[in-house]
Every structure is written in C-alpha cells, then in structure tokens.
Image (tube, rainbow, N blue to C red):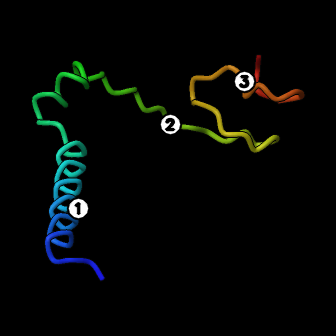
Amino acid sequence: MIALPKLVLIILVAGLVWYALRWFNRAPPARVMRRREGPPRPQAAVEDLTQCKTCSAYVAAGARACGKPGCPLPA
C-alpha cells in the first residue's frame, strides 16, 4: 500500500507537470502573432470564368486558350 506522504508527493508532482505543460503550450500574445504575420498581403483579383462550348473547360474570360490539345479557342 502507498503511504500518505508518497501519495501527496505524487499528486503534487503530477500537478506541477500538468501546470508546466499548460504554460509551455499557451498561445503567444497578440503582439507576437502580428509580428510573425508581417504586413497584410494584397487580395488577388477575381476574374469571371467562361466555359468552352466544345471541350467544357472553364477559362478566364480574357484567356487566349484553355491549354487542352484540340481546343477550339484561339491560341
């Protein structure tokens, strides 16, 4: 059987390990996260897509061809 002082010591050590793991895995402060992210990136432009009537590929409206062999879109 485990003596009471040993049981208390085991509980204390388990509590300290749990607290240490919680402390090491905490989320970094917001100021550190902002520094890691860097400046905001510009958003990419959105283009409408059109479907080729023959090969059914979707291409940007301003694209010259879809890139598939035999595509009727002008190259």
Q: Amino acid at mark 1?
A: Ala
What residue lies at 15% left-to-right and 77% top-to-bottom? 4
Mark closer to the chain start, 3 or 1: 1
Give the CA distance from mark 2 to mark 3.
15 Å
Is 60 in front, or is 42?
42
Against 65, is 59 above or below? below
Q: First in sequence: mark 2 or mark 1?
A: 1
Point out residue 20 in the picture as x, y percentages from the top left corner.
19, 48
Mark 2, Cα crowd under 10 Å, few <14 / some 14-19 / many 20+, is few
Position of residue 38 in the picture relative to residue 44 (left or right): left
Q: Residue at x 12, y 35 (%)?
A: 30
Quadrant location of the C terminus in the rendered image: top right
Viewer-side label of 2, 1: 1
Residue 40 falls in which quadrant of the image? top left
The mark found on residue 34 in the picture is none
The N terminus lies in quadrant: bottom left
Identify the disc placed on residue 48. Answer: 2
Secondary structure beneath disc 3?
A: loop
**Residue type at mark 3?**
Ala
Q: Where does the image place residue 57, in percent across and percent down from the top left?
A: 72, 40
- On residue 65, the disc is 3
Task: Give the foreground label among 3 and 1.
Answer: 1
**Badge number at residue 14:** 1
Residue at 61 percent across and 39 percent down: it is: 50
Quarter location, residue 37: top left
Between residues 12 and 72, which one lies in front from this camera angle?
12
Amino acid type at image mark 2: Asp
